[in-house]
Amino acid sequence: MQVISSLQALPAGSAQDLVVVGAGGAGMAAALFAALDGRKVLLVERTGHVGGTTALSAGTTWVPGTHHAAQVNPSDTLADAARYLTNAIGDRTPAALRQAFLDHGAEAVRCLETRTEVKFRPYPKHPDYISDLGGSTLAGRALEPLPFDGRLLGDLFKLVRPPIPEFTVLGGMMVDRTDINHLLALGKSFASFRHALKIIVRHGMDRLSYPRGTRLVMGNALVARLLYSLSKQSGVTLLLNTTVETFERGDQGVTGLTLQAGADRRTVAVKGGVVLASGGFNRHPELRARMLPGADMGWCPAAPGHTGTAHAPAQAVGAAYGQGALSNAFWAPVSLRQRADGSTAVFPHFVMDRAKPGMLTVNQAGQRFVNESTSYHLFGLAMQAANQVSPSIPAYLVCDATALNRYGIGMVRPGASAKDLAPFLADGYLIQGATLDELAQALGIDAAGLKASVDEINRCAASGVDPRFHRGETAYQQNIGDATAGTKNPNIGPLTTAPYYAVKLYPGDIGAATGFAADGDARVLDADGQAIPGLYAVGNDMHSIMGGVYTAPGITIGPGLVFASLAARHAGTRLAGKP
């Protein structure tokens, strides 16, 4: 693979077999699948890093029916997965499109694992998010990328987008949930002590030569594995800091595109086609205002590259957006804090705090309005719906001292000392009250409402049942609770130990659900439902096959990889002279 940062370094006059716009997880996969078939590929990235939002994510990849599934759930079938998706999504997306994903998922994963350095392992337990629906499973469909040694990348290591700093420890050491469990138990278990010591010593050695740790996990590991695999392909050129200005469409479809980097422009001819993988519309001001009204861009925790700048050129050649999604984006509650350098940390509250015992969420009247243990997507949607009735943005995640010590809250880590808490209290990220009345006053919310909500959750903790919001009733919710807490319900515990704490929550869009309509080969469709020859969309540029429903962990990355393989394969047939 050749890496260039200037259009002047791009050889003039030579047509590419495939051009991929966007070097996030899906775009890198599309380039890799094409390169494995011997294609000449130009991978265009508008930033100076690869990985996009995939690099910031957990890297979970939802693909049913792979050879990994049999290790943890041998009874699962593609028919069950199809039934689950039908139950969850209904007619929001074509069943045939979802079936194309299911039919080709195992093949795509096996190709990556046998021919590249991309490797996965199954989670022993990782339920589908709507786990009370028929066809759902507790394990086998969600895959995790294996950790990767970033030192193998050499000079390419600096191209991997670093993780969200607040998701690292000790100045840039990445940790996954296995590491976190060991770190929390290092004084209780020799195995945990040994694991923790190993990764800490490794990180200390790394920092002698690198600006951050080179033991990469989660999304960083997946991106690094894709990049490492691409680096072994001679036919790939990675062009950084470059945007798409126009697409060229002739009688045979899309035949080229004009690229821009600063004041330089270059038109590139393409024979097989162009794959859109730019990450979606989320940071495009006009598209955002239309599709995500009321959601401040500052609440978005995703990578900066998904500006939607490639969307207007695609529309100019006929591309049409998909319709019928439950929501135009996928959501998570986030909290905000200004960093020392003046930038804003946007922290997604996925699973580490809000679903745990001793936590509850209230609106500005101090009232509960949501099942705190529901999926982060449904939580974000619930915030927006509740805000139409009573001010609920921001909402407030509240806990007592026991829960704060055991689980942390947002950017505040478990077991934080008074010294550790001080800066969070000083800048207002963490709000404290010696009593519930004092906390309500500090938050500016109704004190009677807050006390009534705490009384309610304390009654729920005593009975183990939440009659209003049904917290902790499904396998998914229980999985992100704490079965070791000794409570009747792993998701519900009392708030009784002063002082009390809270952080403000906002609905943050974590990725686009609405993208360009596409068929089972990832070909972009026009307003009449006809495929545009030579134009493909994958990742968040493709209208989600989930129809805005967050069905399971990894339902953006999994389909992104699978449809990347289908796009690359179909573009190859065009090179062979087939339509």
Image: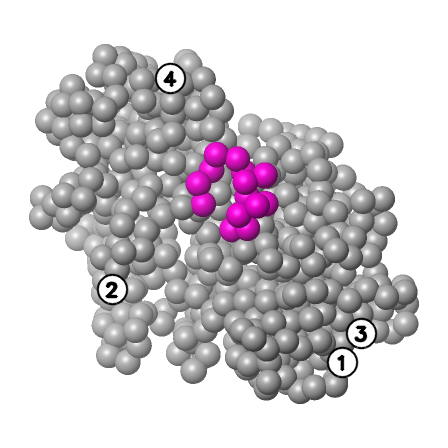
Amino acid bearing label 4: Val
Amino acid type of the residue that numbered disc 1 sits on in the rendered structure:
Ala
Q: Could you tell me if the residues under marks 3 and 1 are in contact, i.e. CB atoms within 8 Å?
A: yes
Using the image, tell me which numbered label, if any, was put on residue 171: 2
Query: What is the three-letter code of the residue carrying label 2?
Result: Gly
Front label number (4 vs 2): 2
Q: Label 4 to label 2, Cα distance in Å?
A: 41 Å
Q: Secondary structure at mark 2?
A: loop
**Residue to which mark 3 is pinned:** 271
Label at residue 15 = 1
- Distance from Cα at disc 3 to Cα at disc 1: 7 Å
Q: Considering only order in the chain, which callout, 2 or 3, is on the residue closer to the N terminus?
A: 2
Q: Position of residue 529 (x, y in %)?
A: 83, 45
Q: Is residue 551 above or below residue 210?
A: above
**Residue visible at 64% across and 79% down?**
236
- Quarter of the image where one finds residue 361: top left
| CA–CA distance in space, label 3 to label 4 | 61 Å
The magenta stretch spans residue 283: yes
Given contact means CB atoms under 8 Å apart, are the residues at marks 3 and 4 in contact? Answer: no
Please tell me how crowded label 2 is: few (under 14), some (14-19), or many (20+) other residues with Cα within 10 Å. Answer: some
Give the residue pinned by disc 4: 465
Quarter that holds the N terminus: bottom right
